[in-house]
Image (cartoon, rainbow, N blue to C red):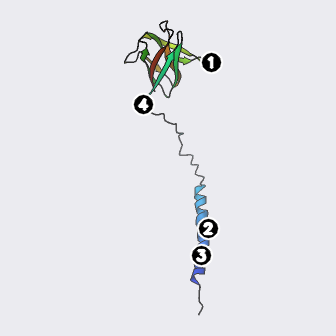
Amino acid sequence: MCAVDVSRARARLTRPVVALLAFAAMCAACSNNNNPSTPTTPTTPTTPAGTVTETLNGIMAPRGTATRTFTARQAGTVTVQLARVEPSIAVGLGLGIRGATGADCKFSQTVNTQAGTTAQLTASVDLGTYCAGAYDIGTVGQGGATVTVTVTHP
């Protein structure tokens, strides 16, 4: 009678089976399934919903400005509020786009106002970069003025 070493026979059979399974898995992962009858649609990243509120706290010198740049992530409504001015004076409040040098804000919408609890400016905007802020209308004294401007945008 012939004695068979079971562990050796199992090892000889197991290695080819493992190699075959590994090869089959690699082939499946490299599938060339270019089915022309199933069109694919590219996905577009979605923008976060809702609005963002940004606050500018600044000190404005006589004949000066205090502005902030912000980016609207999608079209929508921007509101600008002069929330605080110390000392309590009227100043200009504006909304616009950055100048060509990026150093100044070209206001397209302005209002002379005192601090309030609601937005003094509202505008519809497209996706893009804008700026908002306060500017002296001749009322800021030698000590300057502390301003708080709140911008809410999409």
Which mark sits nearer the N-terminus, 3 or 2? 3
Q: Residue at x 54, y 12 (%)?
A: 64
Q: Is residue 140 left or right of residue 116?
A: right
Query: Secondary structure beneath disc 2?
Result: helix
**Distance from the alpha carbon under mark 2 to that under mark 4:** 54 Å
Q: Amino acid at mark 2?
A: Ala
Answer above or below: position of 5 versus 146. below
- x and y percent of residue 120 in the render? 41, 15
Query: Secondary structure beneath disc 1?
Result: loop
Answer above or below: position of 50 versus 137. below
Which residue has dot 1 on it? 101
- x and y percent of residue 3 in the render? 59, 89
- x and y percent of residue 51 in the render? 43, 28
**Distance from the alpha carbon under mark 1 to that under mark 2:** 65 Å
Q: Amino acid at mark 4?
A: Gly
Q: Nearer the viewer, mark 3 or mark 1?
A: 1
Q: Amino acid at mark 3?
A: Leu
